[in-house]
Amino acid sequence: MFHREAGTFKTSYAKDMALFPLPIAKGAAAFFLATVAVAIPAAVLTGLMHEYYLTIFTQIFIAIVGALGLNILVGWTGQISIGHAAFMSVGAYTVGNLVTKVPHEIFGGPMPFWLTIPAGGLMAALIGTVVGIPSLRIKGTYLAIATLASQLIIEWIINHTPAISGGAGASIQVPRPTLFGNELKTPMEIYYFTLFFAVVAIVATMNLVRSRIGRAFVAIRDQDIAAEIIGINIFRYKLLSFAISSFYAGVCGVLFAYYSSIANYEAFQINISIDYLAMIIIGGLGSVLGTILGVIFVQLLPVAIREVVTAYGGYVIANPEQMQLDSLLRTLMIWGIPLLVLLAVRRFVSLGFWTRLIVTLLAIVPAAMTALGVLTYLFGSQFANTSALSAMAASLKLIIFGMLIIFFLVVEPEGLARLWRNVRNYFRVWPFSY
Amino acid sequence: MWKSGLKQLAAAAGLLGLMSAGAVAQDKELIIGMQCDRTGPTQIVGTTLCPAYHDYVALINSKGGVEGWKIKVIEIDHEYKVPPAMEAHERFKKEGAIFHSVYGTPQIAALAKKLEEDKMAATSPGFGSAAAADGKRFPYIFPVAATYWSQATVAVQFAKKQLGGNLKGKKIAYIFFDNPAGKEPIGVLEDLAKAEGFQMRTFGVPSPGIEMGAQILDITGRFKPDFVIAHLFGRAPAVAIKELKGKGFPLSKVVGFVWASSEADILAAGGWNIAEGYHTLQYAGVGRDYQVIRDIEAMYKAQNKEIPKQMIDNSVMYNRGIFQAAIQIEAIRLAVVAKKGEKPTGQDVRDAFERVKNFTLGGLAPPLAITPEDHEGGGWVQVWTVKGGKFVKTTDWQQAYRDVIKKHLADEAKK
Amino acid sequence: MLEELSFIVALIMEGASIGLMYSLIALGFVLIYKATDAINFAQGEFVMLAAYGGAVTLAGSLAGTSYGFILAFLAALVLMIGFSFALERTVLRPLLGRPVIAVIMATIGLAAIFRGLPPITVGASTKTVPLPIPDTPIDLWIHRIPAIDLLGVVVTLLSVAVLTWFFRKSRMGVAMRAVADNQQVAMAMGINVERYFAIAWAMAGIIAALGGIIWGSKLGVDTQLALVGLKVFPVVILGGLDSIAGAVVGGLIVGICESLAAGYLDPYVGGGTKDFAPYVIMIIMLMFKPYGLFGKRKIERI
C-alpha cells in the first residue's frame, strides 16, 4: 500500500546495486536506525525510559553480531554448528590477555579497542578454521556432534591453561574501551559502542551474502556435491564460512568482555550455543532481518516472562478472591457468550479480516483467564509468596523457550522473517488480495 | 495470513506494554536486589537458600521493618549464567535498590567493576573470589562469610587436630570441582603443606561432577591419604560420599567445604547412615535450635501457613539464607540509624557494612567483625559432623592461619 | 608392582561398568535413530524424566516395600511410553523429511521443556530412587563393584540381548529394520510405517525408563541428571549411530578411556581429563571412521 516497485528507475549501476534499492526500504532502514540511534537514547535522557533498558538493547546488539555469524555458517552455508559460544570465549580471552599482557607503554594504556576487536575476531577465526576442517569429511549430524565436541574441548583448554585463562580464577578483568582518551563506561556510551559494531556487522553481512562468496555459500548449502561439480572449491569455502562465522563470534565475545568488564569462560558455555541456534531458527535461517528479529525475541523472552509472572503473581497474591473458580467462570461467561452468539450466527471464516482480528483479540482475554485460572488451581500453592514466583518464572522460561523452538520448527520453519514477509506482502498489494 | 499479522500486532503490543511498565517504589520502602539460581547447576542450593531469604525479610517486615522502613526484595533467577546476572544488576538499579545480594562466583567476578561504578555494595558469602576479602581493593564486595581460603585453613587445622596435633609426614588429598572456585584454595593449601610438613595431592573432578570413580579410586587405591578435604558443589558431594564409602574409606577422615555440607547432600548420597562420620564446614548454624528460626516458625503459625519443609529438611541451606538476609539487613539498619531515619543510599549501606560487629543472631552467625580492611569478617567456620542420623556440632566457631591468608591477600593486591 | 596392577585393573573394571551404563542410555538413542532417522538430543532428559517418574512414585507410601520398586519402574515405564507416543505424534511427524537441523533443534527444544517441568510440578529438591539393593559393594574376585553398578551392567546386557533378539527374530523387529532401511519400499510391502515409528519411540521410552531408574538411583534425581546424556555422543559416534552392538562397544571404550585418563593423565594436567578424553577420541573417530566401528555407511544420494 505504500510500496510500489513500479516507477522506481535506476540510472546508474551503483544505485541499482545499493543495499536498499527501493525508496521504502531506504526509508524503513533509516527509520529504524533513527529510532535506535536517536529516539531511544533521547527517551532515556529525558527520563521517559529508564537507563536499564539500554542494557537490554546493548545485549541485543552484542548478540546480533554473534547470531549473524552463526547464521552465515548455518543459514547460508548449511553447516550445523553447536560450538559457537566457544569462539566467543576465544575472543573474550584474547582481548583479556591483550589488554593485560601487552605492555601499556606501547599505546599509552591498554591496547585500544580498534586493535583488540579485530585481534579477537582473527584469533577466533583461526580456531574456527581448525574446527571446520572436519566439515570436509562429515556432514549434518556428525558435524553437529563434532562441533559440540569442539565446544567442550575449547572450553576445557581455556580452563586448564593458566597462560590463557589468567590463573585458577579463569577470569580476566577487562578495562573499559577508550575513545579519544575517554573511557566509555556509562550505559549510554556502551550502548553506542555496541550499536556501532552491530550496524557494521549487519551491513557487512548484507554485502557478504550478495557477493560471490555468499553465492558460493548458498550453493554449498543447497547441494554441495553439485556445487563442487560446477567448480566451487567447497573445501576452501566451507573453511572460509567457518572462519568468517567464528570471526563474528570472536568480535561478539570481545564486545561482551568490554560490556561486562570481564572475560570468563563460564559465560560462554553450551547453553549459550543453544541460545544462539534458537535465535537464528526462530528468526529465520539465511536472513539478516530474521537474525535481528530472532535475537530480539530470544533476548526479550526471559524479561517478558518474568514481568508477566511477577505481574500475574502479584495480582494473585493481592487479590486471592479473584482467582477463585467461580469468579473466573463469571468472567468467562461475560466475555464468552457474546462471542459464542456471534460465532453461532456467522461462521468465523466468513467474517471480514478486521472483524476476525477483533474477535480473536477479544477471545484472548477469556482464554487467557481460563488458562491462568486452571494453572492457579493446579499450582496455587506455588504462588504463596514472591520467592516461589521467581522459581516458577525461571522454569516457565525454559518450558516456553522449548515450546517456542518446537512451535517455530513445526509451524513456521522459516521463522519470524517469513512471518514478517507475509505481513509485508499482504500490505504491498492491499487492498487487493494479490 | 491474518494469523501472522495478528501475531505481529500482539507481539508489538505486548512489547510496548512491557516496556512502559515499571514498578514504583512506595514510600518507606527499601529495596534489595537478590540474585538466585533456582534452575541451574546449583539449584540444590538456590531453591532453599532464596526462600529462606524471603522468609527472614517477611519476619523483619512483620515486626515493623528496619527502623520503620519496610524491606522489599526483588529476586531474579539467573540460572547461574552471567548475562542475566548483569541484566539483573541493571534492573535492580532501575528499581532503586540500595543493595545487591549476588549469587555465584562468575557473577560476582563480572559485576565487581559495575558495583564499584554504581556505588552499590554486594555480598558473596561462601563463594566468589577470596581476594575480595581485601576491603581496600574491593571496597564494594563483602564476602561476609569464610572464603574458600579461610575454609581451607580451617579444614587443615581440623585435620591436624583429628590426626593427633601433628601433620608432619601425613598425606592429605584435596578433591575439588574443576572450576575456578574449586581451584582457588590450592595455593593456600600448598603453603600450608610446606609449613606443616604434609604431602598434598590434588584430584580434580570435571563438571558436572556426577561421576568420579577414577579419582576416588586413585585416592583410596593409590594415594591412600590420612585425610581428605573435599571442595565440591551441586551433585558432586553426594556422589563423592557414596563413592568413598563404597571403596571403604572412613568418612570420619573426610571434611567437606561449605557447599558439600547440606542435609540434601547427605540424603542424595543415600542417607544419614551412609554418611556417618562425615565432617562438614558450615558458615552458619545448623538445625532449628535458634531464636530466629523459632520466630519464623511462629510467624508461619500466626499466618496459618505450614512451616516450609525446607526449614527442617535442609536447615543448612535455609539457615544460610537467613544469615545472608540478616547480615544485609543489619547493615541497612546501621545505615538508617547513621542517617537518622532517612533513606540510605547504596554508598551509605556500603559504609555501614564496615561497621557490622558482634552480630551473631543467637549463635546462627559467627562473631563477625567486618572492617574496612577485612570484608570477610574473620573467616569463621564451624565443623558439624554426621552422627546418628543428624548433624552434630563438633567444634565451635574457629579461624585458622590468618597470617597465611593475609600473605595471599597481599600477593593478590600486587597483581 | 602388584598394587599398580590392581590399580589398573580396578580402573578398567570401574570404567567398564560405568561405560556399560552409558551404553544403556545410548541404546535408546540408537533405537530412535535406527528406526526413525531422528537424532535425539534430549536422550538425557528422557532418562531424567523417567527417573522422576520412578522417584515420585517411590516417594509415596511405597518407600521401602519390596514391590515398591517394581511399581516405580512400571510408573516410569508408563510415563515414558506415554511421552514417547505423544512426542512422536506432535513433534516428529510434522518434521519428517525436514533437514537434520530441524529435528536436532526440535529435540533440543524438548530438552528445555523437560528441564523446566520438574521444578514446577514436583519441586526442585533432589529426589532419590531407593532400590532394594545392598549399600555395600559386592565382591567379584578382583574388584569390588557397587551394587547399583552391577545392576546397571546386568540390565544393560539383558537389554542388549533382548533387543538383538527382537531385531533378528521377531516379526516386529524385522519390520522395523525394513522401515529403517527404506521407508517407501516398506510402505509398499504393506508395513504401517507410522505405527512402527511410534513403536520405536515407545521402545526407546522403555529403555529410557530402565536407564532412569538405574541412573536415578545412582546419582539422585534432579534436573542435573540430564547432563549424563551428553556422554551419549562419544558412545554412539564410536559405535555407530545405528548399531546396538556399537552402543555396547562404544560405551565400554568410552568408560574405560575416561577411567584410565582420570587415573593416569590427571596428575599431570591437574585434573579434568576425564571429560576431555572421550571427546578427543570422538573427533579422531569422526575424522577417520565417521560411521563408527559398526555403523552402516550412509550412501548419499543427490
Image: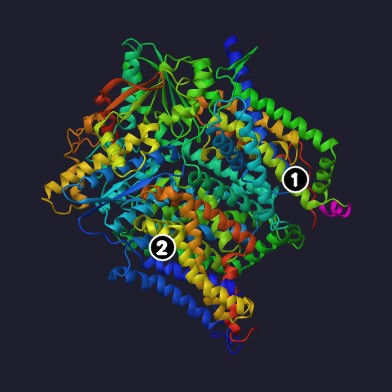
Magenta residues span C183-189
Check residue B167 in the rendering and tell me which mark sits there, or answer none.
none
Prevailing secondary structure class for the magenta stretch in the rendered image:
helix
Q: Residue at x 26, y 33 (%)?
A: B410
Residue A334 place in picture, x, y as percent: 47, 71
Residue B329 place in picture, x, y as percent: 23, 43
Q: Nearer the viewer, residue B305 or B351?
A: B305
Q: Nearer the viewer, residue B238 or A213?
A: B238
Question: Given the image, on which type of amino acid does mark 2 rest?
Answer: Phe
Q: Chain of mark 1?
A: C
Residue C144 place in picture, x, y as percent: 60, 16
Cα–Cα gap, marks 1 and 2: 47 Å
Q: Which residue lies most toward the left here?
A: B340
Asked if residue A296 can be seen in this view, the reply is no
Judging by the rendered image, the residue that carries numbered circle 2 is A57
Q: Which quadrant would the N terminus of chain B be assigned to in this image?
A: bottom right
Question: Given the image, on which type of amino acid does mark 1 rest?
Answer: Ile
C259 left or right, relative to B103: right
Specify whether residue C188 is painted magenta.
yes
In the image, residue B162 sits, relative to residue B186, either above or below, namely: above
Which quadrant would residue A112 be assigned to in this image? Answer: bottom left
Q: Are marks 1 and 2 in contact (CB under 8 Å)?
A: no
B114 left or right, relative to A257: left
In the image, residue A267 sits, relative to residue C164, either above or below, namely: below
Judging by the rendered image, the residue that carries numbered circle 1 is C199
Q: Chain of mark 2?
A: A
Provide the secondary structure element on which disc 1 rests. Answer: helix
Q: Which residue lies most toward the bottom here?
A: A7
Q: Nearer the viewer, residue A408 or C233?
A: A408
